């Protein structure tokens, strides 16, 4: 069923359309890149990548990450065009509301807000647990409150201060990844500057397993691809920050291209080195594969170094998540779909009320992870996982209907500051791959809970919007 466009799109070049936002535009391309990378590079790479390799095998894991990077490119191509057309803060639901319908925008916003609210709580908990390596006598909840206060301060000062904090957080993580690729890659070529050589594998020797290139068959790769999709989540944060970006028509495409290229190099490069260094039967979740590789090549204090890096990665993801949550609530209030108090800005242009509510949401999810980890928290985590793919589907569908309406209303595609290539192949292909990932979730008992809780949550958002704002609001786009 074809959605009825709630608003008439302006056929002028998207970059010239007026921007209704009182948030301050103080971030440049480097901030956008590091915000996106800060949201993506986290425990999924530093910790869970070992599980990915053990399931898909060395070569299968590399293929899975290549597929994930390809899907990210498709989604980012759609996002780039939309972010310039609607350069507003918390833009995901704006895209959907303008191009598909307000109810879809409403559901998208709350999905994404819940996704990051849960992530914030889990990042605090994991960081507190890691701090016990150095401070075993300090309770985890104490570190959770300390980190919460620090990240709240970063976000409350100014959007530029937040961007700078995220920039330096990301520098630490990127340095660790580059170190792994350079030192691990040198060891694979037989150069061991930090150790006596030992029993290191040579080049891709570990890829030739006794069970062939794909020891667990195609199923192992499929399940891994699903996990990789989630590992790449956060790249879409460029769209959230569009409303606070200087010269979005130039900065957003540049940041998008840079982010995709760097993620491809860092993720695929790191996974290749790890898979080539550690036999897939010996890698898992009991130790970060980064620690294993650094220890194997003779890096002193590898465990302590990586403990610091992983804590930085978790806080970086929490920093980006808190920013995203606050802007999503601000944007909902700006659209009239949340209390007006959430739209209030302080004198530095920060939506402080929305930021405070988001922090409370993050601390509530943290509390649920301690009090009810197998009930309430399981539901939240399942919906959060479902939300990642759901938001990507919303972005690609929004791009499809936006471009079609733009052309129908007389717009000249050649005048767009940025346009996704190969329309309509890119949005349709991206949407289809996301749907396939959801079908795969249904086939995997360990991940099926995401559908059991995610689909009812989305349905509840639509029902609430229908009764709260009425059918007239859906048609009018209010």
Image (cartoon, rainbow, N blue to C red):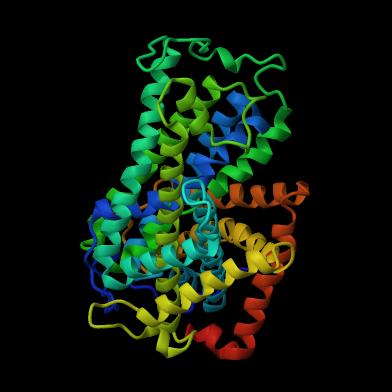
Picture residue at 26% right of the left edge, 75% below the top: 18
- Comparing 75 with 445, the one in front is 445
Expressed as whole percent of the image width and height from the top left, the position of residue 271 reads: 50, 30
Q: Relative to residue 107, is residue 188 drawn left or right?
A: left
Expressed as whole percent of the image width and height from the top left, the position of residue 188 reads: 45, 15
- Comparing 20 with 319, the one in front is 319
Q: Relative to residue 316, is residue 140 drawn left or right?
A: right
Q: Is residue 128 above or below residue 346?
A: above
Picture residue at 35% right of the left edge, 79% below the top: 352
Residue lying at the far front of the rendered structure: 137
Picture residue at 74% right of the left edge, 58% below the top: 449
Expressed as whole percent of the image width and height from the top left, the position of residue 220 reads: 70, 34
- Comparing 201 with 394, the one in front is 201
Expressed as whole percent of the image width and height from the top left, the position of residue 197 reads: 45, 10
The N terminus lies in which quarter of the figure? bottom right
Question: In which quadrant of the rendered view does residue 95 lie?
Answer: bottom left
Q: Relative to residue 22, is residue 316 drawn left or right?
A: right
- Residue 78 visible to the viewer: no
- Residue 262 visible to the viewer: yes
- Comparing 140 with 67, the one in front is 140
Q: Is residue 323 above or below residue 279?
A: below
Q: Is residue 199 above or below residue 128?
A: above
Picture residue at 53% right of the left edge, 76% below the top: 106
């Amino acid at each position: 069923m074809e959605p009825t466009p709630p608003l008439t799109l302006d056929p002028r070049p998207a970059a010239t359309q007026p921007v209704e936002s009182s948030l301050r535009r103080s971030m440049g391309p480097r901030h956008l890149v590091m915000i996106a990378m800060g949201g993506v590079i986290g425990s999924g790479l530093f910790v869970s990548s070992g599980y990915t390799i053990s399931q898909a095998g060395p070569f299968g894991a590399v293929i899975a990450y290549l597929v994930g990077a390809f899907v990210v490119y498709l989604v980012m191509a759609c996002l780039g065009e939309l972010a310039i057309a609607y350069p507003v803060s918390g833009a995901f639901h704006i895209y959907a509301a303008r191009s598909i319908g307000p109810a879809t925008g409403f559901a998208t916003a709350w999905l994404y807000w819940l996704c990051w609210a849960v992530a914030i709580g889990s990042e605090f908990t994991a960081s507190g647990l890691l701090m016990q390596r150095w401070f075993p006598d300090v309770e985890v909840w104490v570190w959770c409150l300390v980190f919460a206060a620090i990240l709240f301060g970063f976000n409350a000062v100014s959007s530029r201060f937040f961007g700078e904090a995220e920039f330096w957080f990301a520098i630490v993580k990127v340095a660790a990844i580059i170190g792994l690729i350079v030192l691990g890659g040198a060891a694979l070529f037989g150069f061991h500057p930090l150790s006596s050589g030992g029993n290191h594998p040579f080049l891709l020797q570990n890829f030739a397993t006794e069970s062939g290139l794909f020891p667990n068959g195609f199923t192992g790769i499929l399940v891994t691809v699903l996990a990789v999709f989630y590992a790449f989540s956060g790249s879409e944060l460029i769209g959230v920050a569009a409303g606070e970006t200087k010269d979005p028509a130039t900065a957003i495409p540049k940041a998008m291209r840079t982010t995709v290229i760097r993620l491809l190099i860092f993720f695929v490069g790191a996974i290749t080195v790890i898979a080539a260094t550690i036999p897939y039967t010996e890698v898992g979740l009991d130790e970060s594969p980064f620690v294993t590789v650094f220890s194997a090549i003779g890096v002193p204090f590898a465990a302590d170094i990586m403990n610091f890096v992983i804590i930085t990665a978790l806080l970086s993801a929490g920093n980006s998540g808190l920013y995203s949550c606050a802007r999503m609530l601000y944007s909902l209030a700006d659209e009239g779909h949340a209390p007006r108090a959430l739209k209030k800005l302080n004198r530095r242009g920060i939506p402080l009320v929305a930021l405070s509510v988001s922090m409370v949401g993050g601390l509530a999810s943290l509390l649920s992870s301690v009090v009810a980890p197998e009930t309430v928290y399981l539901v939240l985590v399942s919906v959060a996982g479902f939300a990642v793919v759901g938001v990507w589907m919303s972005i690609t569908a929004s791009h499809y209907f936006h471009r079609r309406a733009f052309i129908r209303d007389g717009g000249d595609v050649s005048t767009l500051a940025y346009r996704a290539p190969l329309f309509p192949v890119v949005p349709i292909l991206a949407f289809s791959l996301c749907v396939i990932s959801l079908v795969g979730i249904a086939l995997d008992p360990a991940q099926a809970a995401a559908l059991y809780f995610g689909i009812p949550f989305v349905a509840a958002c639509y029902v609430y919007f229908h009764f709260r704002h009425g059918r007239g609001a859906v048609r009018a786009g209010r």
